């Protein structure tokens, strides 16, 4: 069994930022609203977007709460987040830092949202720290997305095979680690529920290429001269599934809501 890293080092995502913004699927807005309703979020509440990347969660929640604080260790991600927030017309405080920098100086929060970043953290230690920062009736919110096994998603297996061919597994996290739910059940936030919203989207093949290049294990920094080969292989492999340069993706945006008992 592999447990949490003792180091506070994080993979660098500077070379992935434009690909991340262009290619990663955003969370369904209906899910954001449903979670806000579930937690009775109001303008009296503060929310943290931890490991915020380009700030999608913070930007989505900003109109529903009084203040949002976004935290990420990658300056280039925070620069992208700031630009996206300005375009969306929302005011968010962006802080360069990681889960290791959390402390009382940040104040108290109704909720801490984490999207596709919890696996990079010392999860048990982060949950202990968040216990002191989250209000008594607040929550940890873990967001992710999955693809239901439906005919529209037939292309996804081929997509994953291409990405796997170019993956540098030495920079990833151990796949045998405990699931998030196991860590949460042993934490202060052991009351768990999950909400999902399913959507059908048309995605340009170019955006799937961006999605592949947005991963820490298959980023342009990792691939170097092989980047062009990934682009070529992905274009070729996706062609049988595409119509007018697009594939149909059925995606379920999920939120795992963890509260105290």
Image: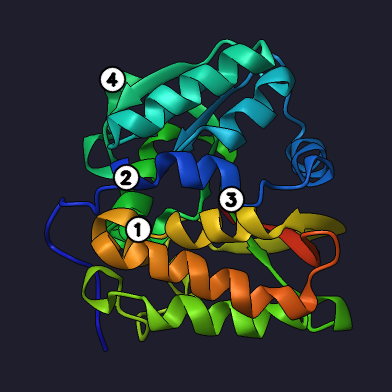
**Front residue of 4 and 155:** 155
Structural crowding at the residue carrying mark 1, measured as other residues with C-alpha within 10 Å and reported as few (<14), some (14–19) or many (≥20) = many
Horizontal placement of 165 versus 162: left or right?
left
Between discs 3 and 1, the one toward the N terminus: 3
Q: Position of residue 150 (x, y in %)?
A: 85, 82
Q: Return the residue at label 1.
A: 219
Between discs 2 and 3, the one toward the N terminus: 2
**Front residue of 87 and 3:** 87
Res 195 → quadrant = bottom right
Res 198 visible: no
Res 233 visible: yes
Q: Are discs 3 and 1 less than 8 Å apart at CB?
A: no
Q: Return the residue at label 4.
A: 105
Q: Are discs 4 and 1 less than 8 Å apart at CB?
A: no
For residue 149, the mark is: none
Q: Return the residue at label 2.
A: 15
Q: Return the residue at label 3.
A: 23
């Amino acid at each position: 069994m592999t447990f949490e890293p003792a180091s506070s080092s994080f993979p660098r995502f500077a070379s992935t930022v434009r690909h991340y913004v262009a290619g990663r699927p955003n969370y369904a807005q209906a899910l954001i609203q449903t979670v806000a309703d579930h937690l009775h979020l109001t303008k009296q509440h503060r929310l943290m977007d931890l490991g915020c990347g380009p700030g999608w969660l913070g930007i989505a929640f900003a109109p529903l709460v009084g203040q949002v604080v976004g935290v990420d260790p990658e300056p280039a991600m925070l620069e992208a987040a700031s630009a996206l927030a300005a375009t969306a017309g929302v005011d968010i405080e962006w802080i360069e830092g990681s889960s290791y920098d959390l402390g009382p100086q940040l104040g108290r929060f109704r909720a801490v949202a984490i999207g596709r970043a919890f696996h990079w953290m010392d999860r048990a230690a982060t949950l202990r720290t968040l216990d002191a920062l989250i209000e008594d009736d607040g929550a940890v919110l873990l967001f992710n997305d999955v693809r239901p096994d439906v005919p529209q998603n037939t292309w996804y297996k081929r997509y994953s095979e291409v990405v796997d061919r170019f993956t540098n597994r030495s920079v990833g996290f151990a796949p045998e680690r405990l699931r998030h739910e196991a860590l949460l059940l042993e934490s202060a936030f052991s009351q768990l529920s999950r909400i999902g919203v399913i959507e059908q989207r048309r995605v340009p093949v170019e955006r799937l290429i961006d999605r592949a290049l947005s991963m820490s294990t298959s980023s342009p920094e990792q691939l170097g001269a092989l980047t062009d080969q990934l682009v070529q292989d992905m274009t070729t492999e996706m062609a049988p599934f595409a119509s007018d340069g697009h594939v149909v993706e059925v995606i379920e945006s999920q939120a795992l809501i963890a509260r105290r008992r």
